Image (cartoon, grey):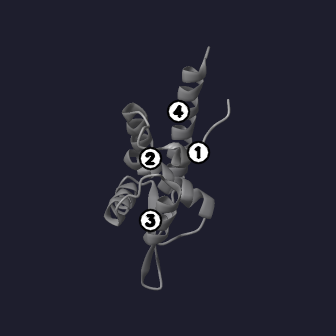
Amino acid sequence: MKRTNVVTTMSDDTPKPFKRLVKKLTIENLWLYVLKYMITRNEPIKAYEVVRYIRKILPYKPATVTVYTVIYRLVREGLLDQVKVGGETLYKISDKGRKTFMNAINFIKDLLDLLEKNV
């Protein structure tokens, strides 16, 4: 099955249930995108770099404070580590964060398999 780019396929006449799905899988699950970016960078980074990345890739543009809140929660839950470098606070993914991210990806793959079965 050929996949389309959600950003380019959303329009005013896109059905509301589909728009809700996109919102739930993006803005309401920002933690997945934060951890993904941390994995791909594989080095401590500033929170604002994460904001720029998320605004670039998602069809919805979350407020800066929303992304910062997600980052702070991920730190509190042990999925991200804070690193002090030259007086700045940087963030990197923890082992627990990597494991949680992979569990989430596997869960999503299982859901896709279920939804695509016999279609």
Mark 3 lies on a secondary structure that is helix
The residue beneath circle 1 is 5
**Frontmost residue, 17 versus 72:** 17
Q: Is residue 50 above or below residue 73?
A: below
Task: Judge the density around disc 2: few (<14), some (14-19), many (≥20) Cα neighbours within 10 Å.
Answer: many
- Amino acid carrying label 2: it is Thr
Quadrant of residue 63 within the rendered picture: bottom left
Viewer-nearest of discs 1 and 2: 1
The residue beneath circle 3 is 51
Viewer-nearest of discs 1 and 4: 1
Mark 2 lies on a secondary structure that is loop
Gap in Å between the C-alphas at discs 3 and 4?
25 Å
Q: Which numbered marker is on residue 25?
A: none
- Amino acid carrying label 4: it is Phe
Cβ atoms at labels 1 and 4 below 8 Å apart: no
Task: Judge the density around disc 3: few (<14), some (14-19), many (≥20) Cα neighbours within 10 Å.
Answer: many
Q: Earlier in the sequence, mark 3 or mark 4?
A: 3
- Amino acid carrying label 1: it is Asn
Q: Is residue 1 left or right of residue 103?
A: right
Q: Earlier in the sequence, mark 1 or mark 4?
A: 1
Viewer-nearest of discs 3 and 4: 3
The residue beneath circle 2 is 26
The x, y position of residue 20, in whole percent, is 38, 37
The residue beneath circle 4 is 107
Q: Earlier in the sequence, mark 3 or mark 2?
A: 2
